[in-house]
């Protein structure tokens, strides 16, 4: 029993400390996401460590009722290799935004968590599918919200 526990402990430790393939120093592109309607964000990633990176997303949106808002999100991510050219990532972060309609303009903040999978093509392009869970703190962006997104980024 003790040897089995030791084996599983070492296996899990190896999984979380193994070096993944080198991730790109920088990547920029678009992230299309769905949360009640389809939206597009500009997305940028920058490497922080061998398996860590910072992702920044900026979205400018207009709703059917002529309300406009922007949302900026920053996420610290850990990246692990699943297979050659295939990675998964998870992270946490937060953001700020502004909502404006004919009668009011309000700033809001939110916390976010992210999990996703990505594929590195032979060309300097990466495609990712991810899920973001957000919690807004103000009335114009309040409570639990989530979206699923597909990103296409150029790596440099």
Image (spheres, helix red, strand yellow):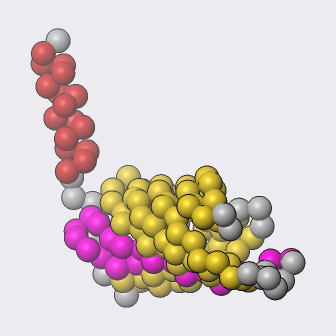
Q: Residue at x 41, y 60 (%)?
A: 92
Instruction: Determine if residue 29 is in view.
Output: yes
114 shown above or below 123? above
Q: Name the quarter where the C terminus is drawn.
A: bottom left
| Image: 15 above or below 114 | above
Residue at the far right in the pictured view: 65
x%, y% of residue 36?
77, 61
Residue 47 as seen in the image, left or right of residue 133: left
Q: Residue at x 78, y 67 (%)?
A: 37
Instruction: Give whichever of 91, 124 is nearer the camera.
Output: 91
At x 17%, y 12%, the residue is 1
Does the segment drawn in magenta span residue 123?
Answer: no
**Of 88 and 68, the residue lying toward us:** 68
Q: Is residue 41 left or right of residue 118?
A: right
Q: Left or right: 150 with respect to 9?
A: right
Residue 152 visible in rendering: no
- Residue 32 placement: quadrant: bottom right
Q: Position of residue 111 (x, y in %)?
A: 48, 61
> How many circles with numbers are drawn on the protein?
0
Residue 117 at what x, y percent from top left?
Answer: 48, 58
Residue at image point 21% right, 36% down:
11
Question: Which of the 4 quarters of the picture holds residue 84?
Answer: bottom left
**In this orientation, which residue lies closer to the viewer: 82 or 103?**
103
Using the image as rendered, state which of residue 57 and residue 84 is in the foreground.
Answer: 57
Instruction: Classify 41 as above or below 136.
Output: below
Span shown in magenta: 45-64
């Amino acid at each position: 029993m003790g040897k089995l526990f030791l084996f599983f402990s070492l296996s899990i430790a190896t999984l979380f400390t193994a070096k993944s393939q080198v991730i790109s120093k920088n990547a920029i592109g678009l992230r299309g996401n769905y949360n009640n309607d389809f939206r597009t964000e500009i997305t940028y990633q920058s490497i922080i460590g061998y398996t860590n990176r910072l992702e920044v997303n900026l979205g400018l949106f207009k709703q059917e009722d002529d309300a406009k808002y922007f949302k900026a999100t920053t996420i610290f991510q850990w990246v692990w290799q699943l297979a050659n050219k295939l990675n998964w990532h998870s992270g946490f972060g937060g953001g700020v935004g502004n909502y404006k309609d004919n009668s009011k303009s309000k700033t809001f903040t939110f916390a976010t968590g992210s999990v996703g999978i990505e594929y590195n093509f032979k060309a300097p392009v990466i495609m990712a599918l991810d899920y973001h869970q957000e919690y807004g703190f103000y009335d114009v962006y309040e409570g639990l919200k989530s979206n699923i997104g597909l990103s296409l980024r150029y790596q440099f």
